[in-house]
Amino acid sequence: MSHRHRHPSSRRKDLGLLALRLGTGGVLFAHGAQKLFGWFGGGGLDATAGAMEHMGFRPGRQNAMVAGLSEAGGGALLALGAATPAAGAAATGAMAAAVSVHAPAGFFATSGGFEYPAFLGFVAAGIGLAGPGRYSFDHLTCHVLDRRWVVGTAFLASAGAAYAVLQKRTENLRAEALRAEDEARRASATEDTEDSPRDL
């Protein structure tokens, strides 16, 4: 079907996907650039690495690099509509990690909850699954990197990687909590020893 004879609803869909891609991709790119380069008021890679270590994502620098690349790279590719399934999957995986950090504060962003990263993740996943539409790099290249098998492979790989990272974080936080408990017990035992009556 030629462009002249495309149904109006099809054009609206393509324009809607373009708007979603540009908005979501731009936001994700900005967050990733904050982490990697310190742009837009971000802390850069060193500060992000320290924050990652504090949140249980270790090694911090490696996790900071992966998170930054997933957000910045995934966001840029989403905006362009290039390798859309892989871009959507990468961004979704990064947002899954962000959700795990904010989850203890509940849902709403006003209380520090996971509302915002969850929303970005769902939109990125939706674009990756639906495809980029006509106004995209994938369309110009005849969807070479937007095949059905790419969709399945990308999302399975992202889910597996996110699961492994989150499991490792859980183990790190559990080990840290156990160390803190052990140190507290030792400190308490030392205080009890110092406070006990001494033989004359």
Image (tube, rainbow, N blue to C red):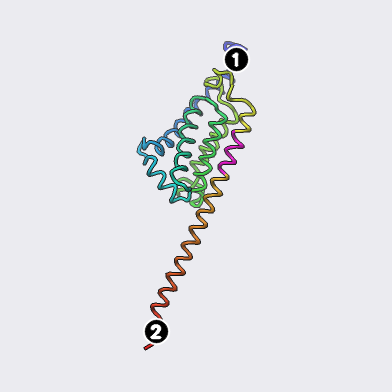
Q: Name the residue under label 2.
A: 197
159 or 175, which lies in front?
175
The reply to whether callout 2 and callout 1 are in contact (CB within 8 Å) is no
Q: Given this view, does label 2 or label 1 mark the residue nearer the observer?
A: 2
Q: Tell how many labels.
A: 2
Q: Position of residue 59 (x, y in %)?
A: 46, 47
Quadrant in which residue 148 is drawn: top right
**CA distance for labels 2 and 1:** 92 Å
Which amino acid does the dot numbered 2 rest on? Pro
For this rendering, which residue is in front, 105 or 176? 176
Q: Where is residue 75 in the image (x, y as percent from the top left)?
A: 48, 31
Write down the residue under mark 1: 6
Q: Relative to 101, say whether 88 is above or below.
A: above
Location of residue 161 (image quadrant) = top right
Q: Assess disc 2: are there few (<14), some (14-19) or many (≥20) residues with their C-alpha within 10 Å of its C-alpha.
A: few
Considering the numbered disc 2 on the image, is that residue within a helix, a strand or a loop? Answer: loop
Most distant residue in the left direction: 41
Q: Which mark is residue 166?
A: none
Q: Which residue is drawn at 55% across and 22% down?
A: 138
Whether residue 26 appears in magenta in the rendering, the answer is: no
Range of magenta residues: 154-162
Instruction: From the top left corner, tell me how far across and down residue 125 is, in percent.
Output: 56, 34
Near mark 1 (Cα within 10 A), the count class, few <14, some 14-19 or many ≥20, is few
Residue 148 as seen in the image, left or right of residue 134 = right
Q: Is the magenta stretch mostly helix, strand or loop?
A: helix
Report the quarter where the N terminus lies. top right
Q: What element carries label 1?
A: loop
Say which label, 2 or 1, has the lower sequence index: 1
Q: Which three-letter amino acid code belongs to the residue tagged 1? A: Arg
